């Protein structure tokens, strides 16, 4: 154990990919004085919670896993949620992280004390902890978004959200509705369609879909990956660089580039759906990449099944017996599945956070969340965020960004551990200049062209990174003390 770490408590918030990765980074650096606070009773975050039928990653598994914990035996190119959760459980086991985790412990308040450079964290049960450094890895897509539909709770049948699937309810032989046609819906719809008596899919906005080049890996390939790690790394690099290569098609506001992808998607639609009227209903009317592109080889064609109906008539109200659409039709149902996304937390304070001079994070961020490189916030010293403002990817694995953030936080922690530094606080002008640059670039991104969860209510984008992942990694490779105000003991 690093002796300097004994009096240097570090709090990591959340035991999903971000918190687990940060814990491993610290252990690898010989730092053991950290606690991971997790409000649930198990690790895994998104992959613990999203267990709906068909839940899987739409980013290749070899890229959607830690670069420092490669798994040679992914069963397929795009692993299901159960396998990803198992991967995380295995990693936690291997690194013996469990003793560091406090389960059922929800932090609801954090206060910074300038005199001794510590954060005081308070839990929902009113327990207090102090930490010299906080790494917030609470995730951005966690809490289900319940739609604001009149009469929602009057429904007499079964109703649940994709992110809180009710495994006690069997959809077999029932009349089921799915509200929403985002990434979660495109996975759940093909999975339950063969089981249910009737499936009605309520679409508000048709979205772009591309085929998923998924396949199971043969045993001999997995053995080869285990035996020759270089092969595994080569595959990972290939998949990662391919996502970067096609990135501009997904994130740039470049209509000619978008048109190439749109043509491909429309060609795919024509292959999948024979009925021209249905094709018309499914044809998107916004620029490719504006919303997250959906990856599925069976969603569109499922909508042509005899027992499936795409409903594009707007929802008027939910009644005890089903969904009433604006045309006056009552769709009688046994169950309603809400695939309506998340209350996005990428660009807001996770809870009541009070920094230097009593400033409250929610107030500081009232006009939009900003941070330096998405990680540090002026006035909130020794606080690092994994997946903070403007760090989400539209085109590749989120873990590429998170790992860069973990490395950056680790460098700062090492400096702070040195003994004489009380805290580091990013300089306001450094943070402002960085964010001016981000917002200037944002004008050239496609995301402003259509409403989506990427945008704040006022249309500002404080969630995604406007550029390549490799460039973000390059920009965050070094913690530079000159960019920070440094307080010493
Ligand atoms: O949610 P969404 P999601 N009435 O917000 C509709 C990640 N993810 O859970 O488009 C009717 O994308 C809404 O309609 P519209 C990924 O980052 C990753 O699917 O706003 N409809 C939309 O169709 C993704 O982007 C994986 O008009 C209503 C849908 O609900 C993010 O999670 C898998 C409505 C919500 O779509 C969120 O995806 C799954 C209403 N009142 C998810 N309110 C991976 O594989 C909302 N909608 C990694």
Image (tube, rainbow, N blue to C red):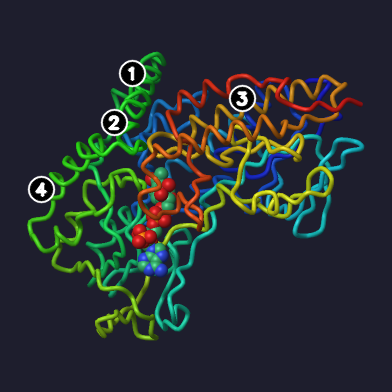
Q: Which residue is mark 3?
A: 407
Q: Position of residue 102 (x, y in %)?
A: 71, 46
Q: Which residue is mark 2?
A: 217
Residue at 28% x, 23% y: name it. 220
Which of pointers 2 and 4 indicates the residue nearer the eye?
A: 4
Residue at 18% x, 62% y: name it. 281
Q: Is residue 7 left or right of residue 328?
A: right
Mark earlier in primary sequence (3, 2):
2
Viewer-nearest residue: 99 or 341:
341
Q: Dot 3: what SS?
A: helix
Q: Which residue is mark 4?
A: 271
Q: Find the distance from the CA under tag 2 to the CA under tag 4.
A: 26 Å
Can residue 81 be seen in this snapshot?
no
Q: Dot 2: what SS?
A: loop
Q: Find the distance from the CA under tag 4 to the CA under tag 3.
A: 45 Å
The C terminus: image quadrant: top right
* Vertical placement of residue 135 versus 224, above or below: below
């Amino acid at each position: 154990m690093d002796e300097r770490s004994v009096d240097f408590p570090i709090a990591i918030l959340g035991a999903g990919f971000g918190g687990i990765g940060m814990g491993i980074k610290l252990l690898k650096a010989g730092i053991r004085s950290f606690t991971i606070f997790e409000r649930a009773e198990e690790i895994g975050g998104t992959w613990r919670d999203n267990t709906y039928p068909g839940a899987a990653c739409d980013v290749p598994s070899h890229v959607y896993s830690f670069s420092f914990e490669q798994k040679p035996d992914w069963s397929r190119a795009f692993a299901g949620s159960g396998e990803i959760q198992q991967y995380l459980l295995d990693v936690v086991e291997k690194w013996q992280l469990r003793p560091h985790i406090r389960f059922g412990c929800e932090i609801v308040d954090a206060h910074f004390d300038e005199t001794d450079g510590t954060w005081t964290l308070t839990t929902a049960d009113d327990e207090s902890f102090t930490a010299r450094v906080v790494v917030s890895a609470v995730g951005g897509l966690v809490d289900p978004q319940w739609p604001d539909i009149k009469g929602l709770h009057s429904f007499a049948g079964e109703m649940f959200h994709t992110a809180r699937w009710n495994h006690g309810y069997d959809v077999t032989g029932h009349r089921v509705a799915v509200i929403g046609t985002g990434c979660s819906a495109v996975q759940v719809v093909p999975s339950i369609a063969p089981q249910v008596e009737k499936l009605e899919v309520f679409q508000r906005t048709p979205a772009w879909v591309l085929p998923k080049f998924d396949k199971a890996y043969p045993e001999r390939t997995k053995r080869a990956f285990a035996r020759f790690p270089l092969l595994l790394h080569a595959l990972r690099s290939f998949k990662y660089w391919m996502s970067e290569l096609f990135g501009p098609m997904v994130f740039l506001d470049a209509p000619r580039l978008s048109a190439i992808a749109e043509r491909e998607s429309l060609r795919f639609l024509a292959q999948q759906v024979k009925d021209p009227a249905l094709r018309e209903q499914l044809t998107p009317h916004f620029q490719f990449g504006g919303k997250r592109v959906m990856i599925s080889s069976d969603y569109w064609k499922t909508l042509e099944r005899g027992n499936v109906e795409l409903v594009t008539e707007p929802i008027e109200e939910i009644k005890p017996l089903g969904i009433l659409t604006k045309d006056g039709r009552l769709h009688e149902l046994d169950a309603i599945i809400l695939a309506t996304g998340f209350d996005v937390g990428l660009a807001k304070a996770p809870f009541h956070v009070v920094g230097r001079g009593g400033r409250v994070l929610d107030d500081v961020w009232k006009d939009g969340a900003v941070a330096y490189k998405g990680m540090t916030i002026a006035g909130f010293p020794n606080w690092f965020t994994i997946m903070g403002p403007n760090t989400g990817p539209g085109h590749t694995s989120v873990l590429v960004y998170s790992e860069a953030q973990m490395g950056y936080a680790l460098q700062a922690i090492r400096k702070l551990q040195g003994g004489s530094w009380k805290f580091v606080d990013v300089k306001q002008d450094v943070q402002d200049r960085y964010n001016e640059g981000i917002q200037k670039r944002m004008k050239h991104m496609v995301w402003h062209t259509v409403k989506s969860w990427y945008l704040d209510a006022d249309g500002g984008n404080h969630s995604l990174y406007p550029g390549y992942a490799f460039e973000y990694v390059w920009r965050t490779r070094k913690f530079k003390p000159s960019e920070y105000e440094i307080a010493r003991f």
